Image (cartoon, coloured by chain):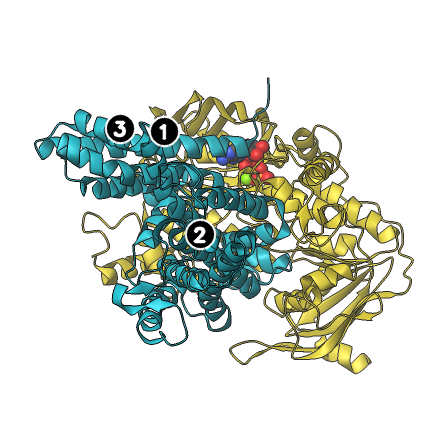
Chain colours: A cyan, B yellow
Amino acid sequence: MPRISSMVIVNIVNILGSIAAIIVALLAGAVLISIAGQQPVEAYRALLDGSINGKRAIAETLVYSCPLILGGLSFAVALRAGMFNIGIEGQLMIGGLAAGLVGALHLGLPLYIHLPLALLAAMAAGGIWGAIPGAMKAFSGAHEVISTIMLNYLAYRLTAYVVQKTGKWLPVQPSLQATKKVVPEARLPRILDGTRLHAGIIVAIIAAFVLWYLLFRTTFGYKVRTVGLSRGAAAYGGINWGLTITLAMLASGILAGLAGAGETLGLQGRQYTAPQGYGFTAIAVGLVGRNNPIGIIFAGILFGALNSGAPSMQADAGVSKEITQVLQGFVILAVAGFAVLNNSSLARKVLTSGQSRRRDRAAAIGTEPDVEVRAGPPAL
Amino acid sequence: MTTAPDTISTETAAIEMRGIVKRFPGVVANDGINLVVRKGEIHALLGENGAGKSTLMNILFGLYHPDEGQIFVDGDEVHFHSARDAVDAGLGMVHQHFMLIPRFTVTENVILGHEGAGGLVLDRQAAAQRVGEIAASYGLKVDPAAKVGDLPVGMQQRVEILRALYHGSRILILDEPTALLTPQEVEELYGILGKLREDGGTIIFITHKLREVAAISDRVTVIRRGKTIGTRVTSETTAGDLAEMMVGREVLLRVDRPPARPGQEVLSCQDIVVTRPDGTTALDHLSLTVRRGEIVGIAGVEGNGQSELVEVLSGLRRPDSGSVHLNHRDVTQRDPNGFRAAGLSYIPEDRHGRGLVLDFPLWENVLLGNTEREPFVYDGRIDVGETKSITGRLMGAFDVRAPSPETIARTLSGGNQQKLIIARELQREPEAVLAIQPTRGLDVGAIEFVHRQLVETRDREKGILLISFELDEVLDLSDRILVIFQGKIIAEYESGKVTRTELGLAMGGRGQEEHLAAD
Ligand SMILES: Nc1ncnc2c1ncn2[C@@H]1O[C@H](COP(=O)(O)OP(=O)(O)OP(=O)(O)O)[C@@H](O)[C@H]1O
Ligand SMILES: [Mg+2]
């Protein structure tokens, strides 16, 4: 009998769980559409039509997927270290701003130098924006949920400030509430004629594979995952907790910064001051992809498809495109629900006998009581 | 033995399990187990690590569903779907790894799952009173208002027992209840269990310690590799018989140990002072030395500075003052990997909180502490294939029973988890080993094996520092015994020159005066 490793089983269970969750969400959406007096079958056909039927539709799906995949990766790497990064939106915006400013400079450089420069600027800016809350937690214990939310506001305001007030020395255009147009040498090239699809999607997919490699094949990733699962074991293994969460948040910010750069250099051609909300959908993408970089590629494409199919659903089936937002909500709920079921044997025990299993009482000899209580990333 | 089991043999059994089968991916944990537990007896369940004891009890308690087999409680067949069903049928369980909520008080923990329809809105005062009453009637000394996280292990276990009694259990399952207890606490537990039996309670008691089987049980059932080997009346059997039934061969209950030939110093600390966060002194100018080729045992009552000493000697904590030397190098300021680089291996006391990442597969657990070391890692890149094959070899050499290196550590039996840690730490070819409670939860065969490994490591000219609350282990294994009391070493004995009683007295701080006078 061929022996299937339990890791493989875990992965299969996760994938099946996500697929089942998506089906449940679509069914729930269908009910909602019927209640609204419309035809769910037609609505979904139109949704599919608008998201995968033909070159243009597919291109649009991928255009939407690009920031969602990068954002999902950003969320995942932080969560692997036990950090709940709510600050992707801000990191994304700061990254986009840096890319937009560098990209709008007339430097007279060729594409293969100017574009990487703009991308690097975005990574650096996003990375710093991510590393700050990591370092704050490492040094003072400041909770990342609070500090990343605060840094989001700081990012919005800083962008507005830069756009409004720095016209003398930076390439901004206050009348448009945006930075100046990115020069052609710094644009992410279009990769499909007649569509908006740009090279950002390639960056996103490469980033996913790089992150997979980092997480599962390097000591950096090993440390990140260990820290996220057990601080006690991390200390025992000589892994510096503070440094590791800071680096994980740095990586998270870099990925979010890249997501911002993709929008600025690939799609919009400039950075606007209004936040776009990708950072929050990215959290959902990370969760649906179960914090696995490869899973996140698929989750990002799914959410991209929901976005790109929405207009045709409205046009062809008369279903308000806001329903796709509701669908996204359903997917998130269903995935979360299935994750709980997945841990069911455990969850059931905890619920029925009212006991927490997280903490092993063997811990009682000489360990800090808080070490194992910490659940680490929820097994979503 | 106070009760005569035979007089009740005609009554229906309290518990009967017939032909229980439970399969996990890659393992048959229970392979047709039969178990009959009579009313009012203390029934010991004995078996090697991974034999399937915890699984069987989890089935009995409704936490797992058997793939095959029947369960009868008081003669009636039952089908439990959850622990709640089992509790309703009068069962209670104290798990191998306790399941309490540290932030809750004793009372809150005890009444959990029994709050009634109102959820957590309940009459705390009445509950606390009732908890207090039950505690008093069984001599379970514990403060109902204390936070569980603040209690020592022995107390926490009483909370678990209290829980069961509060919920009306007549049949109590205890999974390795003594593994974490000090000898005094074990005695107290015996008292509590004896009382329960007098009141007509039935107790199933899992243990690896043959001495405990003899001390407390009326009958004993042995299982091996998921099968029932047999049930015996305890008074009609011997430790040797039971060990042989368990392991399937003759077991040396004591490892032969040639006299030590100590060489140069390899691990030492000088004048270590550690102050606890609450201002009390944990280590009070403590010094000790371990030489190559010797096993130094530290005996002491829990809480006399052992855990702080271990943290200082492993790099997890910097002492307030004093220094640590490893292999002639001052390592006081290093981190745990710095200690490892200097030649230390550390078998931690807390395998779940420290020694393992339970959600990692076995091979990633073998990587723990080896992240800066070839052949596991080259330039920050993990050699997955090599690490897995080393893991496979270690599993073979140390008899870690699990389907493959990919198995998730959480699913291993407690003893097999421990063996994996020991395997990882000893494969490193250390200069010195810190072995803290190294055989906790291991079966007699595995203890023999680990003890032999430690003695062999010693004979390869390595130094070993052993800390154990198991007096027999310290006595059997150590070439020199140090007694720790209130953060100081207060006595030192040569191997074989001290009795259990003397050691016990010294551990309580008695004899300190004479010792100091003799200096
Ligand atoms: N949830 C699980 N998933 C997969 N395998 C499991 C699971 N629980 C137990 N096993 C396997 O079943 C076997 C029996 O385990 P069990 O915990 O019952 O042993 P045990 O007799 O209690 O051992 P120990 O004395 O070491 O605690 C082991 O091989 C273990 O790896
Ligand atoms: Mg067990």
On screen, residue A302 above or below A357: above
Residue in front for this viewpoint, A339 or B59: A339
Q: Residue A374, can we see it? A: no
Q: Is mark 2 within 8 Å of ligand 1?
A: no
Pointer 2 local density, CA inside 10 Å: few below 14, some 14–19, many at least 20: many
- Under circle 3, the secondary element is helix
Q: Nearer the viewer, mark 1 or mark 2?
A: 2
Q: Amino acid at mark 1?
A: Asp
- Under circle 1, the secondary element is loop
Q: Amino acid at mark 2?
A: Arg
Inter-mark Cα distance, 1 to 3: 64 Å
In the orientation shown, which residue stands out farthest toward the left?
A37
* Residue that badge 1 annotates: B74
Discs 2 and 3 lie in a common subunit: yes
Q: Which residue does the image show at 17% across and 26% down from the upper left?
A: A42
Inter-mark Cα distance, 2 to 3: 30 Å
On screen, residue B477 above or below B84: below
Residue in front for this viewpoint, B203 or A164: A164
Q: Chain of mark 1?
A: B
B501 with respect to B78 (left or right):
right
B428 with respect to B303 (left or right):
right
* Residue that badge 2 annotates: A187
Badge 2 or badge 3: first in the primary sequence: 3
* Residue that badge 3 annotates: A49
Which quadrant of the frame does ligand 1 lie within? Answer: top right
Image location (x, y in percent) of residue B203: 46, 40
Q: Amino acid at mark 3?
A: Asp
Pointer 3 local density, CA inside 10 Å: few below 14, some 14–19, many at least 20: many
Task: Using the image, tell me which numbered label, if any, was put on residue B335.
Answer: none
